[in-house]
Amino acid sequence: MTSIKTQIRSYQALLDANARLRPLLDGRLPVEEGETRRRTVLICSGTGCQASRSEAIAENLRQLVAEADMEEQVEVSISGCFGFCEQGPVVEVFPDDVFYVKVTPEDAEEIFEEHLRGNRPVTRLLYEEPVLKEKVATQHEMSFYKKQHRVALRNCGLINPEKIEEYIAHDGYQGLGRALTELEPDAVIEEMMASGLRGRGGGGFPTGLKWQFAQKADGDEKFVICNADEGDPGAFMDRAIMEGDAHSVIEGMAIAAYAIDAHQGYIYIRAEYPLAVRRLRMAIEQAREWGLLGEGIMGTDFDFDVDIKFGAGAFVCGEETALMRSIEGERGEPRSKPPYPAQSGLWGKPTIINNVETLANVPQILIHGADWYSAMGTEDSKGTKVFALAGQVNNVGLVEVPMGTTLREIIFDIGGGLKGGATFKAAQTGGPSGGCIPAQFLDTSIDYESLEEIGSMMGSGGLIVMSEKDCMVNIAKFYLDFTVDESCGRCLPCRVGNKRLYEILTKITEGKGTEEDLQKLQELSDTIMNTSLCGLGQTAPNPVLSTMKYFWDEYVAHVVEKRCPAGVCQSLLRYEIDPEACIGCTACARVCPVNCISGSVKQPHVIEQDECIKCGSCMTKCKFGAISKT
């Protein structure tokens, strides 16, 4: 790949570089009729696909292309996450617009011979729509992508994240260039405020307003921090952006720094994201080499640099004041607010903290303008939002949709419905701080205000889909287990109160709960929410309160009837043998670890309920469907 050896010393030099490097992406653009272009094969190189040997796919294809002396006709490259994680590893061939799923290293030869040489797509590797049961060849035809609108994820699956040349070829650093050469800091902040961009880390605070507070704050030194400490269970939005488009985060930080007159930035990321860390380091070094970080950026008097700070994986360090204490070398504990970080943050200096997704939107707003961005979304929630769609849904993956898209559209149109045709029961948004949304709200607009009205929250973007196979009491217990483990322990309501909530939920799922416990859950939750020091404690009871509100009958079943309607809580299960279906083969009795099944050969067997440990071995072993659990 051709590279520019000289540094970019002006905005015009950046525009010239963009024009010269643009041909690098030509193979990924649609072909006019009769036009021939070099093919580009992009292989997903995100964490998930790498775990399924996507690097071996790329290596095998490169070797086949080289052996056939076709390197002038075919480029084999890597990309960030395409978002379609359920179907990985993903391979896309441009400009043919052919999208392959669940590819293995052994499939490389067939793709090469049939497609790259024979111009015949490999049909068996095409995606099959889960409802229509039809093969789909192109990305834009897939239900998973049809309703998506990618802004924060715009480069993921399109450029090689390890090549700054490709980022620049796709208008990279032009938002920063416009800010430095055409706009005063006040105008940058006005643009952000007019765009309506709100923090995508969970709080939803207006980004421009936060920047304005920091700009106006007195201080001889100011800082910009990127919160990359993504720790919600099932969430991987920020990690995917860092792995697939790290330069967009760096550019967003530089724009923020120019707006508030900061000259040092920090990316706070947990060390357990090695690929994201490697690509961030690579992007920072490349930006320095090209003169896009450091002194006199683009020939101006603006200086800015970025360093990486590691977290040890503490969930509480996602809270901004705990995060800053961790950077300072202190124990990651939150402090009381005010003062807010914009007035007194890192080392007591004015500091703005934005998460990865928020910053990835910033360059596009500076390039296309506030009106372009604010035209997407709803009146109070502008732009798009990235969700990590997971759980009992067919199309697990990263989804970016305009604010205001309904839950039904995300789960059934984009997500392809529930696995095995299961019935939708609830969706958890906002991670451990969010709430469970029942089926009656499937047509709710996904925006900050609408989710709060029904007892949930946007959070950073985790969206877990649940079916009738999920027990809502157990779900609440799962999230409480997480928050209890992650509490820093500084304040009593969170340290002790959430532990008590967890103990009561455990008692209920073991069949030992009382009606008094249900009242305690409600009262204790209210106390914790109103008296905890930081957002972790204040929102921890949300899963309990939302499940009690919308799935009260399940709590009653556990407490009064001593049964789990979903058949999940082991202590409340009851295994029974149907005497009409049992042929007396004795298979169940032979595998029972506690010998609680009695009966003679060729005679119906019986389970002694008082001795049964609910392991389910008998039901698994029975070939005649004679054993059921209730």
Image (spheres, rainbow, N blue to C red):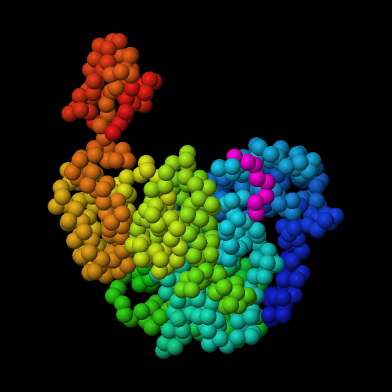
Q: Position of residue 150 (x, y in %)?
A: 59, 62
- Quadrant in the picture for the N terminus: bottom right
- Quadrant in the picture for the C terminus: top left
Magenta part of the protein: which range?
133-141
Q: Is residue 613 left or right of residue 444?
A: left
Residue 507, placed above or below residue 366 = above
Q: Residue at x 24, y 20 (%)?
A: 606
Q: Position of residue 117 (x, y in %)?
A: 79, 42
Q: Is residue 618 left or right of residue 96?
A: left
Q: Position of residue 152 (x, y in %)?
A: 56, 65
Residue 23, placed above or below residue 465 = below
| Res 321 visible | yes
Q: Position of residue 411 (x, y in %)?
A: 48, 52
Instruction: Using the rendered view, name the quadrant where residue 529 is placed.
Output: bottom left
The question of residue 134 being in magenta is answered with yes
Looking at the image, which is closer to me, 98 or 288? 98
The question of residue 560 being in magenta is answered with no
Looking at the image, which is closer to me, 282 or 562? 562
